[in-house]
Amino acid sequence: LMLPFDTNILPFKTGVYVVGGSVRDLLAGRIPHDYDLVVHQDCINFASRLAATTGGHIVELGRQKQKVLRVVTRDRFFDIMPVNGTSIENDLGRRDFSINAMAVDVSSGNLIDPLGGQKDLAAKTVRMVSREVFRKDPVRLIRAYRMAATFGFSIDKNTQAAIAADANLIQKSAGERIREELFKILQCTESHSYLSMMAHSGLLFSVFPEFLKLKQRRLQSVAPRTLFDQTLDSYNHLEKLLNPEDEFRRSIGIQSLGNDDADRSLLIKWAILFHDLGGLPAKPPCANGEINNPGARANDSAAMAQDICRRLRFSRRQSDTIEMIIRHHFKPIILFNAHQKNSPVEKEFIRLFLNCNDVTPDVLLHALAEFRGQREVADPVINEFSGFIRMLIQKYYTQLRPRASLPPPINGNDLINEFGMKPSAEFKHILKRVEEERLSRPTYSREDALKLVKNLLNQR
């Protein structure tokens, strides 16, 4: 196998092998940015000489027993490790999946493939190297689905059976390692089917025991269906809506919704997975989407989501964004119900915007995905709700966000200087009312704001 870099930069070639994902990618026609090398001789000496030759520098990675020496050069990385075992074949036999258990002998260019990785790569199959791989490192349970989702592969039956048998082992793994594998799955544009596979094997319920009560709640529908099924259906609809080429997205006429960023898309996906974890209603949603005490349920779900985020070591910003989406996810449906009764909804939408700010489009897309996931495809109310959400998204981008970017007409100093007020909690209430009025009008002057404050104070 021809390596796409000059092997003469290496201090020596005998007993040196390119391994793992680097070989997998080369065989698949992808040029890696970094290369995993294993060497029989002194790794420190090898890395030092390689860094000197390439003008690079060394970064130590991993723990003491699994230390990796990364040589960073101008255009690529080399991760250098000792051979794990007495031979390269022994090393490959200790890896996770056959497509990652191949090596290239640098001195000869020969492919070393004792476990049939090249055949599995051609068949687009993820297959465990041995029955022990998941017991040695349970994070590999999730990694099987991550590999499959990333490359669009299937998982062979024996590997699926082993995952189902060992699913509970995942609870022994560090939260941050679980999070990183799950993030990579959710970053895939068609991750829904792989989450369904994880649920089928039981692994998803081992990672998130909170989902078990959703699976136990049966819904009133033509086909047997649980609240967990509905959650996955909503997730599937969301994944489609996050695609800029989706019909609804194109109908909006706005190039970007602000959540096309990979991280934002991830967070709204997490939110829709967790949005129904809170107390389940005694009755199913009404035909118009109304549910019992949605605010309390949303708050309970948001609190449970934050517990999960802490368990998996999400960042504070990530956790807060997920919580915000969940706390407000039901409000667009309430606005829609009012709209259908010809009640004005502009002020309530402005209040939703003031609470959610730049997360508002995420809340709206979440609501639409959930609404679609709750209903049959042919339900005509879906088109009505889609049109309503389209109108709100357009209003957000063409009216609310541009107006909110302008300087406020008055501030706390004006309340003190113009009305002799003393700083108090009332400041926040008054300034919020001013902001609501400003956002509801094309133009709003300082005089308009002062007049509103005067009226509010007279009503006290």
Image (tube, helix red, strand yellow):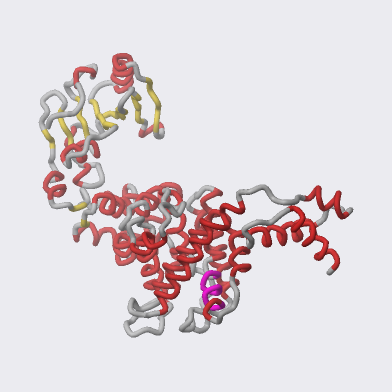
| Left or right of 438 in this view: 381 | left
352 is higher (above) or lower (below) than 219: above
The spot of residue 351 in percent (x, y) is: 63, 64
68 inside magenta stretch: no
Number of residue marks: 0
User: Compared with residue 25, is residue 376 higher up or lower down, i.e. above or below?
Assistant: below
Q: Position of residue 23 (x, y in %)?
A: 19, 37
Image location (x, y in percent) of residue 332: 53, 69
Identify the image quadrant of residue 297.
Answer: bottom right
In the foreground, 22 or 33: 33
Q: Quadrant of the N terminus?
A: top left
Query: Residue placed at 41% from the left, 34% from the top?
Result: 63
Residue sitting at x 43%, y 62%? 208
Q: Is residue 296 left or right of residue 68?
A: right
**Is residue 9 positioned above or below 309 on the image?**
above
Query: Quick check: can you spot residue 215?
Result: no
Say left or right for 250 vs 419: left
Can the viewer see residue 170 in this picture? yes
Residue nearest the observer in this picture, 75 or 142: 75
* Residue segment shown in magenta: 331-338
Residue 253 point in image, percent of width and height: 41, 58
Residue drawn at the location 13% of the way across and 40% of the way down: 113
- The answer to whether residue 446 is above or below residue 81 is below
By secondary structure, the bulk of the magenta-drawn segment is best described as helix
Q: In the picture provided, is 411 more to the left or to the right than 320?
A: right
Quadrant where the C terminus lies? Answer: bottom right
